[in-house]
Amino acid sequence: MDRTASPDGCRKPARAAALLAAAVAATVYCAAGILARSFPFGPRTRTVNDLGNQYVPYHAHLWDLLHGHTDGGLLVNWQSGYGASFLPDLGMYVGSPFALLVALFPRDEIDLAVYVITVLKIACAAAAMAWLLLTLRPGRWWAAGLLGASYALCGWTLADADYNLMWLDGLIALPLLCLVGEWTLGRRRRAAGVLLVALAWIANFYTAYMATLGAGLFLLLRLLLARPSRREALATAGRAVLTAVLGMGLAAPLAIVIYLGTKHASPGHFRQFTRAPADDLLARLLPTTYGFGTPGLYVGITALVLALALPFHRAVPGRVRAGWTALVLAVTLSLQWAPTSLAWHAFAVPQGSSYRQTFVLCGLLVIAAWHALAYGPPDWRALGAATALLAAITAVASRSTLVRPATWPVLLLAVAGTLGGLALLYRAGPRTRLAGLAVVILLGTQAGEAAVTSADTTKLRLELLDDYAPWGQRQDRQAAAIAGADGWPRYRTDPGREQTVANDPLLVGGQGAQYYSSFTSDVLYRTLTALGGGWTSGGRSLQSLDNAVTDVVFSVGARVHNPPDPYRTHRPADDGPSTVTRRAVPPLVTVRPAADPAPFGPSPYRNQELLLGTRVYTVPRVTVYDDTGRPVADGQVGTGSARTRATVTARCPAGTQVHLWVPYFSGTARFSGAAARFDSSYPRNRAPMAPLGRTPASGQVRIQLTPNRPSSISTGAVGCLDTARLSTAAARLTATGATEVTVSDGTVRAVLPAHSKGIAVLAAPRIAGWRCATGDGPARPALNHHGLVAVPLDGTSTSLTCTFHPPGLRLGTAVGAVSLVTLVLLTVIPGVRRRRTPRPDFLVTATEGERTKDLIP
């Protein structure tokens, strides 16, 4: 097969290029933080959206795991969602080898640890791309370094991935998997290729899937350009498929668990794919443009001009020009078509941005740019054509609102630097001083525009997305309050309804309902929703429910109450202390007389009673009045109509605790001097039930509602809790419940009172994977008691053991073992055959520049 580059390439230039790319990328990214005055270089937080809600908390939880300070282990996370499967989250969020670096930082410097990991990942992606470019074709090492940095600092990285840092593993994986494709073409390094594929899929299977598709397209084009015989092409394709399958097989213990975890996850409420307008699409090729729902195609003006010049660069073979240009255009179109977009995202509609695969296109653009430079700098004709195309792109993009005034000076300077540097490089020839000046101009241009673009994007994100403070005094107070009240596993300590981030239990400790993950189980989502719980992110982010009945059901014996967080949108700063309220609750395992077959109904108050086993609420008829005093028949209130305020009235027994359940209301509710905030924007957000105060002696309940957007008031919105009945029910469950409960990772053991009959209920969601046994009996799949783990009792057993195994773990382990054995055999057998082959009688040394070969006469 005809190869353009030598099999091993030029290792010294490749190392130099990789080091340069890593240094430039890391330096520019940090410089951008200084320009933006963002953490850790200034007062602006960089913790936005899921970085604050998911990735920092999961890295904090990993720190706890590595230091032995967490509740649970690799199988079960007992801190979130009343007990959640942890292996899928491990694989999704902290499976990267880089994540282990958190162990080297103090716990209260977790934000700095995440930032350092982000910088290192960006640097490694730059180095990997630079190495790949010189492997594809020899060329100027500094140019490979420059383009490697362009790839690592692409618009997708700066706008989307640097705060979704597990995606950065895909940024690293793409050039590495393309390198594996190169090895496959040369029939080399099968074992190393398999291990790289496995590492990519373990680090982050989601972006590894996209990178694998991209590498497959890369290899297909390389095969088409090489024009091998049909037999050689099929052999190469077979080797590539075998390498990919074995690598994915080695990652199967984690990958299959993750895949099945998505099958048991809450379906969520997500929008369908919407194609980006052409002007927005082209605008994202330019510096300092930002749009959340558009693909970040920016790779720097130098790389863009080179890619645009490729079709017109006559020094590059025609097939190479046509092939790379066609591939870039085809992948660009695939971003804009719903079926191919779905295929890129593993056939699951993504929550949020629909362009998570953009890094693949950025990588292909950079590779195309490399081909335009590796064959020699573009001549005047090619540069002129590229400039004309860039002008046309800019003209169309100028109609987009994503292009702001700041874009133009940066763009003009970048274009001037790029064209000037490339023109000098073309004229330089053997003159090293002129070439050196061109290098300085090109590197300076790339570094300057990327730093300004990154800094600008950081500032824009803070204006458009929710932001959260890094670890500080608030988190210190929360953690101290939780540690002082913690009694796990005798009871749970909930971090509180007034949350700091969506995964407070992982960040500051405790064991609560809060849980935000792509793997939030459907059973937990449905159970908490039926009980009056609230959520955001389409049902994937479940919130704490401040309710006495659910605290008894889920054994929440201590609850933290926090002041509002000043970093929450439109919330005032409050430096008050975190306080703790305690409650006598049953143990984690209780005994019920019999399973209640009645399903959950529309009323969360009655659903709570089903789980409790006792009637404790009065649910009165409510009447809603508008601000003129007239009844509102349809329950619709809020801005956008004449009814800007409303009053809810009802009658309840004196002294009962008034609760308000208005899941589709956004605004403030006031009752008896107390106020509660509700935030609903269905289908994205749903407001939880909230306690308001005690019913007065008159029994008259009047709740004043001030909506801030159009809302609706549910039928049966008010529930009045008899706290004395609840205390009696809690005492009865305690008296008949387990006398001792121990919890270790995925195993719960309980000692039950003698002659216990009915069902034992574990206060944990009945997610797939739970099996239970009584006494010395066999383990069987646990029953589902209104969403909780349940086990039938026959009155003879006094012990209960429940174990959790994530679905897919056994299958994944078996697949991994088969893949490992296959890889060992494929590696060892050829070596044994070579050893058994008789040594040749003499050696013939090949001509200079070639390797020494053993030739048999």
Image (cartoon, rainbow, N blue to C red):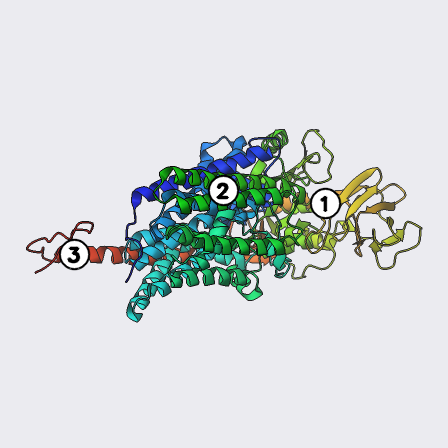
Judge by depth and name the residue closer to the eye, 513 or 273.
273
Judge by depth and name the residue closer to the eye, 311 or 300.
311
Mark 1 sits on what residue? 726
Badge 3: few (under 14), some or many (20 or more) residues near its Cα, within 10 Å? few
The residue mark sitting in front, 1 or 2, is 2
Kindly identify which numbered label has been placed on residue 446.
2
Amino acid type at circle 1 is Leu
Judged from this view, the residue extending furthest toward the left is 841
Is residue 547 left or right of 517 when viewed as pictured? Answer: right
Q: Secondary structure at mark 3?
A: helix
Q: Secondary structure at mark 1?
A: helix
Answer with the quarter of the image where residue 323 lies.
bottom left
The residue mark sitting in front, 3 or 2, is 2
Mark 1 and mark 2 in contact? Answer it, CB < 8 Å.
no
Q: Residue at x 37, y 47 (%)?
A: 131
Judge by depth and name the residue closer to the eye, 295 or 803.
295
Badge 2: few (under 14), some or many (20 or more) residues near its Cα, within 10 Å? many
Kindly identify which numbered label has been placed on residue 834.
3
Q: Position of residue 94 (x, y in %)?
A: 48, 45
| Nearer-N-terminus badge (3/1) | 1
Q: Position of residue 177 (x, y in %)?
A: 39, 54
Amino acid type at circle 2 is Gln
> Which quadrant, please, contains the C terminus?
bottom left
The answer to whether 748 is drawn above or below residue 818 in the figure is above
Judged from this view, the residue extending furthest toward the bottom is 230
Mark 3 and mark 1 in contact? Answer it, CB < 8 Å.
no
